[in-house]
Image: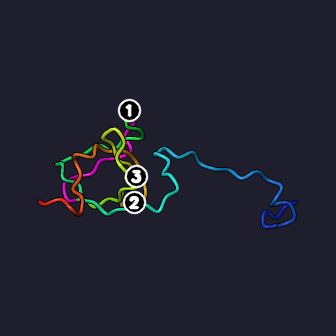
Amino acid sequence: KKSRNSSDNSNDRPKVTTPQTTAEAPKTDFEIDITVKASSLRVVTRPDGDELVGTVTRGDKVVQLTNAQDGWVLIRLADGRTGYVPETLLLFPDDEE
């Protein structure tokens, strides 16, 4: 077998998946566009964790994926990564600036 393009046994190989380092977004239709109001905000993998997903800054647009739980909200960043941030540091559509 010299050809890698042969399709005879491509289904015999196990699929290789890359582990995600970001928080797992629950399957939901709940999505709200929100704005970061903190000057700098760490996005972490879990509310009780300190593993950094990324950082966002004041004015950045993110998407809220879940209702707040214990003061934390799961968000999706512009590049698709997900993580948790404190609810109090976000500006929601109903908030007055």
What is the distance, in whole Å, between disc 3 and disc 2 at their CAs? Answer: 18 Å
Magenta stretch encompasses residue 55: yes
Q: Do the residues labelled 1 and 2 touch (CB within 8 Å)?
A: no
Of mark 3 and mark 2, the one earlier in the sequence is 3
Seen in the picture, residue 75 relative to 94 is either above or below; the reply is above
Label 3 element class: loop
User: Range of the magenta residues?
Assistant: 48-59
Label drawn at residue 79: 2
Of mark 1 and mark 3, the one earlier in the sequence is 1
Image coordinates of residue 12 in percent, x first then y, are 83, 55
Amino acid found under the numbered disc labelled 2? Asp
Label drawn at residue 6: none
Residue under label 1: 48
Magenta stretch encompasses residue 37: no
| Dot 3 crowding, Cα within 10 Å, few <14, some 14–19, many 20+ | some
Q: Is residue 56 left or right of residue 14?
A: left
Q: Which residue lies furthest to the left in this view?
A: 97
Q: Depth-wise, is mark 1 or mark 3 nearer the camera?
A: 3
Amino acid found under the numbered disc labelled 1? Asp
Image coordinates of residue 51 in percent, x first then y, are 39, 36
Amino acid found under the numbered disc labelled 3? Thr
Residue under label 3: 66
